[in-house]
Image (spheres, rainbow, N blue to C red):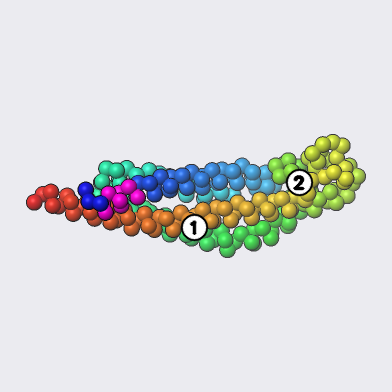
Amino acid sequence: MGCGEFLVKYILFFANLVFALAGLTLLGLGVAVQLQSSDIVQIADFNFEVAPITSMVVGGIVFFIAFFGCCGAIRESNCMLVTYSIFMLLLMIVKLTLAILIFVKLDDVVNEVPKWLKEAFNKDRTEFQAIERTFTCCGPDGALSYMSPLLPDTCCATPPCTPVNPYPSCTQNVQEFFQTFGVAIGSIMIVIVSIELVAAVFGLCLANTVRNKSRRAHY
């Protein structure tokens, strides 16, 4: 095995270990966002759950393909390496598209949060308390939302709950939550795409080397 082939083989192997971890990170972020936003999704009428679900699906696929790439590199299988590279290129296109959509649509989602929360609050204040528990917040606009000297226990850390010791508004906390996780998911996807481009090229180079070695062995 030549020095160049050895380097490509093990760079590809360790790069795929990074992809596997990145895929698990995307999967974990998707699960975290889905669990924490489930109360909002059930009460407010919007489809933000598409983002975490997509993150979970993409993360799982990335992990599977990265595992496939590791096996192809170690076994020097031309078929596995070519298949891996094709899947990588397809995933790059999908993830780059998703990352762009997240960054383009994120501000719109964040700006719509006050409207969604006010609609949910006016629709059913009892159900809205699920959001307050999840995000440790109080009303869409803080304690003033209730227009009462007595607030529900979900609005404060310790009872009795009054306008003196409430949590901040849910609008502020939920907007920060969406902004933070939206940027995190989009940024991770961009980083993965950049590394995947190199991995796909290395995979094709190693596949070509393996194929030429196999041809020479038949002569």
Where residue 4 appears, as percent x and y from the top left, is 26, 54
Q: Residue at x 44, y 58 (%)?
A: 194
Q: CA distance from mark 2 to mark 1?
A: 32 Å
Residue holding disc 1: 190
The residue nearer to you, when weighing 43 against 176, is: 176
Where residue 139 appears, as percent x and y from the top left, is 79, 48
Asked if residue 127 can be seen in this view, the reply is no
Give the residue type at disc 1. Ile
Main SS class of the magenta portion in the image: helix
Residue holding disc 2: 137
Where residue 145 appears, as percent x and y from the top left, is 83, 51
Q: Residue furthest top?
A: 159
Asked if 133 appears above or below 189 in the picture, the reply is above
Q: Residue furthest left?
A: 219
Mark 1, secondary structure of its residue: helix
Sequence-earlier tag: 2 or 1: 2
Q: Tell whether position 58 is magenta.
A: no
The residue nearer to you, when weighing 110 against 75, is: 75
The residue nearer to you, when weighing 203 against 127, is: 203
Residue 198 sits in quarter: bottom left
Q: Residue furthest front?
A: 3
Where residue 32 appears, as percent x and y from the top left, is 59, 43
